[in-house]
Image: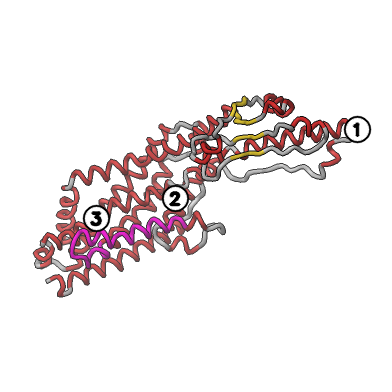
Amino acid sequence: MSAAWAVFLKELVDALRDRRTLAMVFLSSVAMGPLVLVLISTLVSNIEKRAEARELVAVGLDAAPTLKNYLQRQTYTMQPAPPDYEHQLTENKLGDPVLVVPADFEAKLARGEVPVVEVISSAANQRAQGGVGRLTRLLAGFNQEQATLRLAVRGISPAALQALQVEERDLANPATRAAQVTVMLPFFVLMAVLYGALNAALDTTAGERERGSLEPLLMNPASRLALVVGKWGAVASVGMLIAVLSSFSFLPGQWLLRSESLAAMFQYGLPEALAFLALLLPLAGALAALLMAVAIRCRSFKEAQANATVVVLGVSVLPMVTLFNQEGEQAWHLWVPALAQSTLMGRVLKGEAMGAADLLVPALACAALAVLCLVYVARQFSTAAWR
C-alpha cells in the first residue's frame, strides 16, 4: 500500500501539472450544467413566447371572412405570408406554418360544400413543424363550430352526434414532464466524466511508454499491482473530481433558467446531486481502468487516442438504448456500465425513488470491470514486451 500510495501521489501531481488541459476540463465540467440548462430553457422559452404571441401566417384569408372572424375571436392576429413562403419554409427562414385559403372558400361554405384549405410546412423545419398542431386544432375548432351552427339551424341538437365524451388525464408528475425536456442531461454528465479521465489515463500508460519513463518505473522493487493501483487511483481521482463538479454544476445552473414553467418543473437539489454522485463515482473508476487497459498496449499517445475512440463511442451509444427502447426499462440495463448510470439518472430527474439494490447492481458491475482491467494492465506490465 505504501508503494501504491507513492505512485498515486506521483501520478496525481503529473496529472495536475498540465494546467492548461486541466483548466479546460474543469471549466467545461463546471460550465456544462449552466450551459446545457440555459440552452434547454432558451428553447422552451422561445416556444412559449411563440405560443403566447398567437400569430398566424396566412395566404388568401381576406377571401374567407367567416374563418377570419373565428380566428380573431380566438385572439389570433393574422400576418400575410411572404411571396416566397415555400422557399423560406424549406430554408428554415420562416418559423410558422402557412395557412392557404382558396379564393372560393366563402362561396363553397355558403353552398354547404366542403372547401379545402392547406396547412403548408416542412418536416425539416422544426420551428414551423411545431406550430402545425396548433393551427390544425384551430381549424378543427372552426369546423366544429360550423357543424354546430348547421345542426342548430335544422333544429337538431349537436349532442345527438356525440356518442361519448373524451377527457384526457396525464399520470406523469411535473418532474417526469420536465425530464422529457432534460433527457440529455445524463449523457452530457457521462461524457464529461469520460473525457475528464481520458487524458490522464492515456498519459500515465502510453504517454509514459512513449517518453521512455515507464521502463525505469518498472525497475523499482514495488510490485506491478501496486504500480497499477497507484496509477489507476490518480486517473480515477481526476474522473471523480469531474463527476463532482458536473453534478453540482446543475445547482447554480437552475438560476439561469429563462422559462418559468421549466424552472417550476425541474427540481434538482442536493439529494439529486448526491444521487448523481453515487452513480457516477463507481463509473469513473471503471472508465479509468478501462481506458488504461486500452492504452497499455499502445506505443504512442496518438495510437492510444485512436484506440480509445472505441470506448468513447461505446459510452456515447449505450445511453441511447433508453431512447430507442419503447418497451421501457429492462433488468439487464442495470448491469451495463454507462447504460445503468444513464437509466438511473433519468429516474432521479423524474423524481422516482431508488432502492439500495438499484445502486448496488451498477456499482458491482463497475467494480468487476475495474478489477478485470487492472489485472490485465498488471499482467501487461509483467510481460517481456516492456523490458
Left or right: where does residue 168 sit relative to residue 363? right
Question: For residue 235, which numbered disc appears in the image?
Answer: 3
Quadrant (top left, top right, bottom left, bottom right) of the N terminus: bottom left
Residue 335 at what x, y percent from top left? 43, 63
Q: Secondary structure at mark 3?
A: helix
Camera-side mark, 2 or 1: 1
Distance Cα–Cα, label 3 vs label 1: 81 Å
Q: Earlier in the sequence, mark 3 or mark 2?
A: 3
Q: Secondary structure at mark 2?
A: helix
Distance Cα–Cα, label 2 vs label 1: 59 Å
Distance Cα–Cα, label 3 vs label 2: 23 Å
Q: Earlier in the sequence, mark 3 or mark 1?
A: 1
- Name the image quarter holding residue 295: bottom left
- Name the image quarter holding residue 272: top left
Residue 129 at what x, y percent from top left? 56, 41
Question: For residue 155, which numbered disc appears in the image?
Answer: 1
**Is residue 341 in view from this perspective?**
yes
Residue drawn at the location 60% of the way across and 35% of the way down: 98
In the displayed orientation, state which residue is furthest to the right: 155
Q: Which residues are magenta?
A: 292-320
Local packing at callout 2 (Cα closer than 10 Å; few below 14, some 14-19, many 20+) is many
